Image (spheres, rainbow, N blue to C red):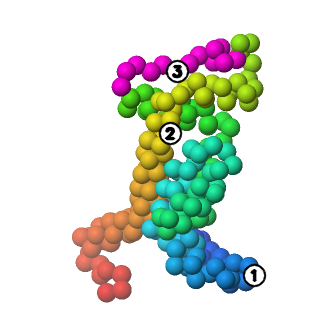
Amino acid sequence: MQMLCTVRRWLRGLEPRVRSHLAQGVLSRFQPWLEQRSLFRFQRQPLARGVAAGMFCGLIPGPLQLPGTLLACAWLRGNIVAGGVATFYTNPLTTVPLYLLAFQLGALVMPGEQTVPAWSSVAPGGDFSVQALAAWMQALGMPLLVGLPALGLVLAVLGYAAVHLLWLAPAVQRQRRWARGRSAGGARPPGG
């Protein structure tokens, strides 16, 4: 719990530094728009919306993840930094398992029986290559196309909820401590 409080304090201390950088240079003319959109606010709601945008856009192929996250954060008024960091859950090690999960989710939603194509059907020797991976993903077809947005929405909701739970956890813990102390000996509430 102490670590969550430390992270919250660090995020609150980060906001003035980001604002001072925004006030200088080229970004200064965009500062009113950026402030209005909450793109650099390190508070619970913008952070949660930024993480949700990053979790959804993390499933976009390669170099389009961060531009997609920037646009989603601007539209949702989410934190750009949190959104960009949240896209890092996809990497070369996690892409194939995530796409398989998206395929299974799409197959669950779509009518009929859908099967995962065998790797040997796209790579005759069984060797790994970028071209073979691209051909295999293309062979996944419609279930993958349906499953990716569905998985993105599920991950976005989970990320949004996780930020809210982690942000509120220290306050709930403090309230429980206060209630235990109050029942034990008539302690007064903080500030009262």
Residue at 51% from the left image edge and 56% from the top image edge: 53
Q: Given the current orientation, which residue lies at the most extreme bottom position?
A: 192
- Magenta residues, start to end: 111-123
Residue at the spot of label 2: 148
In 3D space, how far apart are the residues under numbered discs 3 and 1 (Cα atoms)? 51 Å
Q: Position of residue 164 (x, y in %)?
A: 42, 61
Q: Position of residue 134 (x, y in %)?
A: 67, 30
Q: Is residue 139 above or below residue 182?
A: above
Residue at 73% from the left image edge and 23% from the top image edge: 128
Residue at 27% from the left image edge and 73% from the top image edge: 182
Residue at 55% from the left image edge and 50% from the top image edge: 57
Q: Is residue 33 above or below residue 70?
A: below
Residue at the spot of label 3: 116
* Crowd tier of the residue under label 3, counting other residues whose Cα lies within 10 Å: few below 14, some 14–19, many 20 or above: some
Type of the residue with mark 3? Val
Residue 150, visible in the rendered structure: yes
N-terminal label among 1 and 2: 1
In 3D space, how far apart are the residues under numbered discs 2 and 3 (Cα atoms)? 15 Å
Q: Quadrant of residue 119?
A: top right
N-terminal label among 2 and 3: 3
Tell me the tag on residue 25: 1
Q: Position of residue 54 (x, y in %)?
A: 55, 54
Q: Secondary structure at mark 1?
A: helix
